[in-house]
Image (cartoon, rainbow, N blue to C red):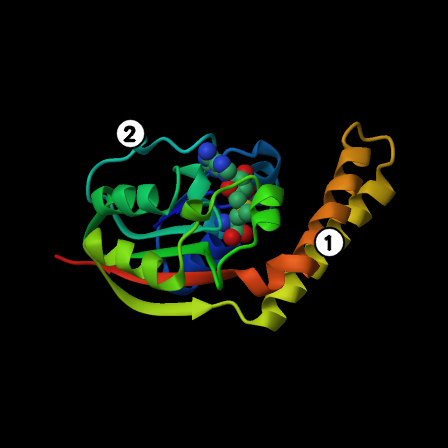
Amino acid sequence: MLDIGCGRAALLERIAETHGYRCVGVDRNEHIVLDARRSLMNTELAERIDLRAESFDEAAFSDASFDVLACLEATHAVSDLRGVLRTAGRLLRPGGVLVVADGHWRRRPDEEYLAFLACSEDDIGTLESNAALAREAGFTVERTHETTDDEWSRYEDMYAANILAFVDAHPEDPDAAEFRTHISAWRQAYLAWGRTTLGFAVYQLRLLP
Ligand SMILES: C[S@@+](CC[C@H](N)C(=O)[O-])C[C@H]1O[C@@H](n2cnc3c(N)ncnc32)[C@H](O)[C@@H]1O
């Protein structure tokens, strides 16, 4: 299994433990990869999970070399959803599974929200158009889990709380003031537009043979 933008590699740990898979995780944030390696140290999972602190480079992997590929909230590590579908089409064996999580519009975005996000309406699909992209790329859509309002607001609450906890604990950090300004603006944008406009979903896709 390959996890692109694996973060702390929690998913790989669970898959290696429950299914005995050999796993590769790639994340360009060396601090979190180091943390993940530390937590695996001296466990039998360490030899089954290869964690690479680098920017994802598709050329490092051979055709049809994985049974499962995950890219959760990290499509930007490849380029976008289309890019992940293309990459997975090459790296998965026929019949292999792609688990990808990405955002989607739940309704047409307001101009002010697009300006806040600095993106255009076309940069993000809908639940239906994302599934259609997957089918065009040669996958069947086996499962879609759309984040519920409760999950989404719990995520946003934790995101804001984590950033505020960090800046309170590290007022001397050179990014502290910027983080504080960012999270205050982000929170307002979420309450004004985000929670009714943006959705998030996990798609389980299977590469057609
Ligand atoms: C929002 S986090 C998601 C982490 C993890 N997949 C999860 O679901 O918890 C996105 C991750 O993608 C990583 N990332 C961003 N660009 C990347 C790139 N070009 N190559 C590898 N990792 C990248 C970031 O360092 C970050 O850990």
Question: Dividing the image into 4 quarters, which one contains the C terminus?
Answer: bottom left
- Residue at image location 76% in from the left, 31% down from the top: 175
Left or right of 205? Residue 159 is right
Q: Which mark is residue 145?
A: none
Amino acid type, mark 2: Ala
Indicate the position of residue 87 as horizontal and vertical percent values.
28, 41
Please state which of residues 7 and 120 is positioned toward the viewer in this rendering: 120
Indicate the position of residue 52 as horizontal and vertical percent values.
46, 35
- Residue at image location 55% in from the left, 61% down from the top: 197
Disc 1 is placed on an element classified as helix
- Residue at image location 36% in from the left, 30% down from the top: 57
From the image, tell me which residue sits under label 2.
Answer: 59
Most extreme residue toward the left is: 209
Amino acid type, mark 1: Gln
Left or right of 163? Residue 88 is left
Q: Which of marks 2 and 1 is in front?
A: 1
Position of 132 relative to 48 (above/below): below
Left or right of 155? Residue 174 is right
Closer to the N terminus: mark 2 or mark 1?
Answer: 2
Give the CA separation, mark 2 to mark 1: 41 Å
Left or right of 205? Residue 46 is right
Disc 2 is placed on an element classified as helix
- Residue at image location 42% in from the left, 65% down from the top: 18
From the image, tell me which residue sits under label 1.
Answer: 188
Indicate the position of residue 164 as horizontal and vertical percent values.
80, 48
Please state which of residues 27 and 127 is positioned toward the viewer in this rendering: 127
Kindly tell me whether mark 1's CB lies below 8 Å from ligand 1. Answer: no
Question: Which quadrant of the view contains residue 36?
Answer: top right
Q: How many marks?
A: 2
Position of 172 relative to 63 (above/below): above
Q: How crowded is mark 1: few (under 14 residues within 10 Å), some or many (20 or more)?
A: few
Question: Which quadrant of the view contains residue 190?
Answer: bottom right
